[in-house]
Image (spheres, rainbow, N blue to C red):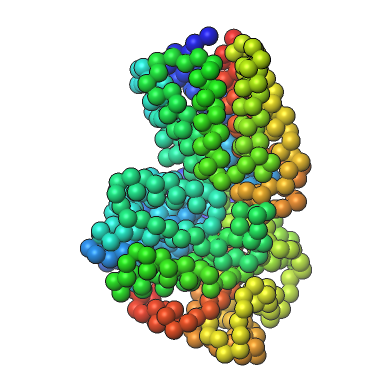
């Protein structure tokens, strides 16, 4: 299974549509423990991504991801902009110059994205952040591929792991970001960043599996 | 929502235009960006100071652009950090070759966006550094939170580091002075009412008619506790005592005091709070060197106030007394 540049752009556009559809849901999650703008900011950012990619010829996937990251950094604002922006820009570096990518490349893309978010956010697992969805997904994808799963099966496992991760954020006391001021009052609410990360992974899986 | 605006989407743009039109001798706005810089920027050979953050805290930060304080101020959407691009544009516009110091309030989004702007400026060979202000004692400064928030004490950082830069200090010296202010300033706020972000159209928290929140952040973040409203004297005591628990102020030490209104609290009430703050400090043998009462770091239409106390030494006293001439702060 290889995915060409123009198809990567289609998938990113689909992510933008799914974020748009879920913007009120993400915003409501954020209103409970943050400042209630996550969905609005993400949709604003991905609209800018769509605009920026509309004339891309798809010849360099690294370039596509870099443009995506830069548009997110410049348009999302808050903490999500630098975090998702850095994730896409770090991911861009591992596939720079490629016209098409395989699942092995995608694994490296996700690893680089995770690394970027950890460094930018100075955060780790179990702090009620994006990482609680992304890190389990990366681990599940790696394990599945090591054990001989094909791309679709491996992605399915990554999405399932992210789903469990998002659910788990309900039990975590936030120690990063605005939710941390709530302390124990943050328990019972899922992290909106983890939720948007799951949404992105789900869209990628849905696009690859059909 | 009852607000004197045209369109929630344009509040920041229109506010910055109006501010620039009111103070054309101090400010100019960068084309295409929500950035205000000193009219004479860049000033050759002077370390430039840039601050910023979400809008809704006026006069912070645009009102502090001028001689002896900031060279540039970057305005994000209401209560949302600006993105790295306008911060980077501000840095480029004010850099006079001696370097740029970013003054950042400690919020996760602000810190990340300013750090990214710093990275961008470094790649362009600009000498740049930053400090993070975290004066709000309502938050435990521990590994369990994003750390203490930056609130009204930030204005002291602008004032004193601004004076240091104006006197010709280099970037490292200006940073050290800014850091010294940060280490010696503590603040604590309280709110009587909520506020409405224009784009949201409704308050994101509520306080009942008889309630107040002690330790409330300037974006309505939770404080230490909610309780029934008390007298100005009792509130002043709570705020000052919480600050004093956190800083070592021996008899005879000199301080600067700032009583900051969050926007809907009249000066009359701020002066009443100041009277009691002054009494408490005086009773403890703490000398008040200078007092500032007014609206310095507001929170849209929130009612309430914050108290900031800055412990002074000779250097900080001298720098506090240096002249400052900006739209919102003059010494």
- Whether residue B19 appears in this view of the structure is no
- Left or right: residue B46 compared with residue A140: left
In which quarter of the view is residue B72 placed? bottom left
Residue in front for this viewpoint, A97 or B60: A97
- Left or right: residue B312 compared with residue B14: right
Residue depicted at 68% across the width and 53% down the height: B144
- Left or right: residue B141 compared with residue B121: right
Q: Identify whether A101 is placed above or below B247.
A: above
- Whether residue A106 appears in this view of the structure is yes
Task: Work out which quarter of the rendered image holds the C terminus of chain B and state it.
Answer: bottom left
Q: Identify whether B49 is placed above or below B199.
A: below
User: What x and y, as percent, mark residue A128?
Assistant: 67, 42
Q: Identify whether B241 is placed above or below B286.
A: above
User: What x and y, as percent, mark residue B292?
Assistant: 49, 78
User: What x and y, as percent, mark residue B25?
Assistant: 27, 67
Q: Identify whether B282 is placed above or below A1.
A: below
User: What x and y, as percent, mark residue B207?
Assistant: 71, 60
Residue in front for this viewpoint, A131 or B67: A131
- Left or right: residue A209 compared with residue B35: right
Residue depicted at 44% across the width and 79% down the height: B316
């Amino acid at each position: 299974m290889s995915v060409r540049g123009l198809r990567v752009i289609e998938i990113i556009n689909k992510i933008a549509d799914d974020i748009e559809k879920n913007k009120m849901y993400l915003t409501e999650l954020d209103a409970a423990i943050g400042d209630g703008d996550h969905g609005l900011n993400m949709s604003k950012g991905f609209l800018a991504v769509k605009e920026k990619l509309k004339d891309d010829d798809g010849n360099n996937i690294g370039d596509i991801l870099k443009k995506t990251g830069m548009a997110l950094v410049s348009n999302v604002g808050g903490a999500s902009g630098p975090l998702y922006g850095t994730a896409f820009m770090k991911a861009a570096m591992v596939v720079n110059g490629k016209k098409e990518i395989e699942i092995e490349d995608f694994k490296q893309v996700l690893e680089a994205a995770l690394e970027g978010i950890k460094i930018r956010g100075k955060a780790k697992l179990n702090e009620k952040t994006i990482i609680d969805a992304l890190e389990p997904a990366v681990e599940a994808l790696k394990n599945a591929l090591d054990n001989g799963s094909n791309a679709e099966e491996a992605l399915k496992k990554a999405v399932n792991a992210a789903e469990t991760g998002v659910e788990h954020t309900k039990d975590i006391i936030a120690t990063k970001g605005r939710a941390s001021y709530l302390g124990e009052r943050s328990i019972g609410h899922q992290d909106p960043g983890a939720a948007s990360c799951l949404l992105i992974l789900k869209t990628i899986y849905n696009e690859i599996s059909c | 929502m009852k607000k004197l605006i045209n369109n929630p989407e344009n509040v920041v743009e229109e506010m910055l235009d109006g501010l620039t039109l009111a103070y054309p001798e101090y400010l100019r706005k960068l084309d295409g960006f929500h950035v205000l810089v000193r009219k004479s920027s860049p000033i050759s050979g002077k370390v430039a100071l840039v601050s910023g953050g979400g809008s809704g805290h006026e006069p912070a930060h645009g009102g502090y652009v001028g001689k002896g304080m900031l060279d540039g101020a970057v305005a994000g959407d209401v209560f949302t950090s600006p993105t790295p691009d306008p911060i980077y544009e501000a840095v480029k516009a004010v850099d006079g070759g001696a370097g740029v110091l970013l003054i950042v309030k400690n919020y996760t989004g602000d810190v990340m966006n300013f750090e990214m702007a710093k990275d961008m400026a470094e790649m362009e060979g600009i000498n740049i550094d930053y400090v993070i202000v975290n004066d709000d004692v309502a938050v435990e400064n521990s590994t369990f939170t994003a750390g203490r928030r930056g609130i009204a004490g930030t204005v002291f950082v602008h004032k004193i580091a601004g004076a240091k830069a104006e006197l010709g200090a280099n970037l490292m010296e200006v940073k050290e002075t800014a850091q010294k202010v940060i280490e010696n300033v503590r603040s604590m706020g309280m709110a009587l009412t909520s506020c409405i972000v224009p784009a949201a159209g409704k308050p994101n928290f509520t306080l009942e008619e008889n309630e107040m929140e002690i330790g409330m952040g300037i974006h309505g973040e939770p404080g230490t506790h909610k309780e029934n409203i008390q007298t100005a004297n009792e509130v002043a005591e709570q705020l000052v005592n919480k600050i004093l628990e956190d800083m070592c102020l021996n008899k005879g030490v000199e301080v600067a005091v700032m009583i900051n209104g969050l926007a809907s609290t009249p000066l009359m009430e701020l002066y009443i709070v100041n009277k009691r703050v002054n009494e408490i400090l005086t009773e403890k043998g703490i000398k008040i060197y200078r007092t500032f009462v007014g609206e310095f770091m507001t929170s849209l239409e929130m009612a309430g106030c914050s108290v900031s106390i800055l412990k002074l030494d000779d250097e900080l006293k001298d720098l506090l007394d240096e002249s400052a001439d900006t739209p919102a702060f003059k010494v």
